[in-house]
Amino acid sequence: MKVAQLPRDELARRLRRGELLLELPPFVARLRSDVASLARDIADMYGEFAVSSPEAFADFSVEVSREPGLRRWYKPQARFYYDDQPSFAPLPAEQAFPMIEWGLNWCVAAHAHQYLTIHAAVIERGGRAAVMPAPPGSGKSTLCAGLIQRGWRLLSDELALLDMDTGLIHGMARPVSLKNASIAAIRDFAPEAVMTPPVPDTVKGTVALLQPPGASVRRVREPARAAWIVLPSYERGAPPVFSPHGKERAFMTLAEQSFNYDMHGARGFEATGRLVDQCDCLRFNYGGLDDAAAAFERLAAASPP
Amino acid sequence: MSMPAPTLLQTALTDPQSVRSCSPAQWDLLVRQARRANLLGRLGSTLQETGLMAAVPGAPRQHLVAAGVICRRQSISVRWEVQCIRQALARCGTPIVLLKGAAYEMAGLPPARGRLFSDVDILVPRALLDAVESALMLDGWQASDHDAYDQHYYRAWMHEIPPLRHVRRDTTIDVHHNILPAIARVRVDAQALIDAAVPVPGWDGVRVLQPVDMLLHSATHLFHEGEFANGLRDLFDIDALLRHFGTDARFWDDLVPRAATLGLGRSLYYALHTSTQVLGTPVPPRVLASAQAWRPVRPVAALMSWCWRHALQPAHASAETAAVRSARAALYLRSHWLRMPFPLMVWHLGRKAWLRTRKNEEAAMAPQAAEKRAP
């Protein structure tokens, strides 16, 4: 059953009781919250995602709950819990949904060592995936958000999960996190895109989440093979330019942007090496989403070497 | 007095075949209990050794696989860390006696399998403590952020100096000069432990406690403890050491006399009693009978047994009952009672409680600090 097929009050009830098991392949998350507005955000953002029975196995049990005492009424705060233990400091209750999103990212990054996890956006077209590892501020999420409005399949905007045995990358096709100026940029670029109301004053500034395309969610169980490693950098007004990027530097970027590269030792080294070897490594300088989408169109159309 | 029923985790570790009948919901709880009790790695290695890994459904199995990755990484890191410590202390002329996790790992002992720990503990002669600390600091270990009270607490009263953290590797070392606090009710002859320590093959200058001392240290540590996040894990360590060393009859011959010499009989009694009762550890009846000499008077013994059994439940919400909370509270007080004279205990615990309240207030005032680590 999909989230969208659950009656709204049933969704709210399951969320309150910690019986909402959201399938985020390859994981399942158990969500619990007493923040009423969350049911709406979850319905809007995760409508196409499947729910499991409350009796199923969940990889991560997470909760966002309102802080007790005076904080219930005065500037209400909420806190993220991982398996009943508070993790991170409490935040204003309006940030409950971004908090769940960040918390889930943390759950995966901190625990899923069956994969090599890389802080990167992953999109796919025609069976070939582009991995975009980049530090915050490089315009990676904005670019990813734009391209998935133009026919690219979303795997992830934050976390690439590399299966070191198969060399395939898994994503969860979760909502894309947009910050500050990116929110308006995506609204202009794709007025039909569905977003949560912007949440101001978070640690990352104003944040809004963008609903993943239904086509991407329906294929969420299909991993992809990377064909490109692209290091985006946004520069206002710059023309879109791909330029070659040394494989050794791409390797170092992937290792630096990985959450658990150091943990895998030789196996992680070999897997990262194979990933870089199989990919065209490129830098991509861009100044606008329309130009960028056209440039990526040409990239996808070019036959593989 | 009623004892707690075995948790899923305890049953899975003592009778691995039981996992065959786990439902998805039970796997969900088992993985969560194991993670909180710091026993997920141990669960994985136990199921691996008993050939049951293939019987674990795919999703929970991935958690065991991931825990295995951390454990393998750790066993490499520990070797490197010990190598660094040995190099730093080369000129001090001190033997380096590893304790607990690092000792199990370096000596290749069964408790090391799937065991996670965060710092390396070493024991050095008290006379060389200053030299050791200076040598470590020259090599990049720095005192962590402790205020004057903490410094005094460690240096005047405890059996270790404040933890040192390495500036580049971000690893922590706890340097001990004894296994119990300097002001504790029981005084242990640390030199006797150091003198009897045995070399780690292939690692010149690195030693671990001899088998009986290692067991006694493990027992003393757990049964003087006041905080039980790793309590069940530590009990499984004792169980694994007893099973491993127990194959040698001399171990059993030496255990009780050694406990008497070191003055650690009470801890040994609790360890043998609790481990046999809870985990079914095989201990020869004659050893159990001699250890009875250190049993407290009957009502106290029954009460203590109740306390240990409850406090050593996995540190997970699913196992936390009112009884578990009161047992832990009682043992927390007891641990301080054993560790320091009464007036000092009142002052010390009072101060800690006051700081805790103040810290909570501060945390409420500065809400966004810890958020930065999330991607």
Image (spheres, helix red, strand yellow):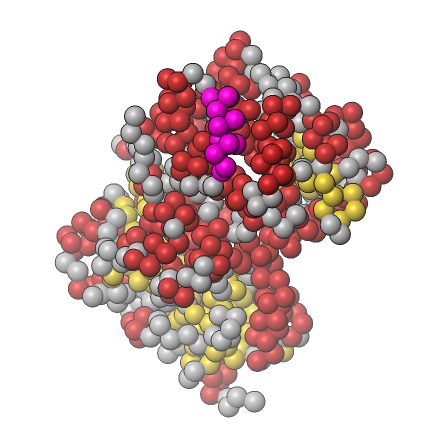
Observer-nearest residue: B320 or B351?
B320
- Give above or below for B346 relative to B117: above
On screen, residue A269 versus residue A23, left or right, reads: right
From the top left corner, tell me how far across and down residue A107 is, in percent: 43, 53
Q: So how many labels did they put on this image?
A: 0
Residue depicted at x 17% and y 64%: A5
Residue depicted at x 59% and y 41%: B249
From the top left corner, tell me how far across and down residue A86 is, in percent: 39, 40
On screen, residue A10 versus residue A204, left or right, reads: left
Residue depicted at x 54% and y 55%: B70
Observer-nearest residue: A275 or B10?
B10
On screen, residue A79 versus residue B83, left or right, reads: left
From the top left corner, tell me how far across and down residue A233 is, in percent: 55, 67
- Work out whether residue B150 can be spotted: no
Observer-nearest residue: B222 or B367?
B222
| Magenta segment boundaries in residue numbering | B283-295
From the top left corner, tell me how far across and down residue B29 is, in percent: 33, 49
- Give above or below for A7 relative to B215: below
- Work out whether residue A262 can be spotted: yes
Q: Is residue B307 magenta?
A: no
Observer-nearest residue: B335 or A258?
B335
Q: Quadrant of the C terminus of chain A?
A: bottom right
Image quarter of residue B185: top right
Q: Quadrant of the N terminus of chain A?
A: bottom left
Residue depicted at x 17% and y 60%: A6
Q: Is residue B291 magenta?
A: yes
- The chief SS type of the magenta part is helix
Point out the residue furthest to the top here. B343
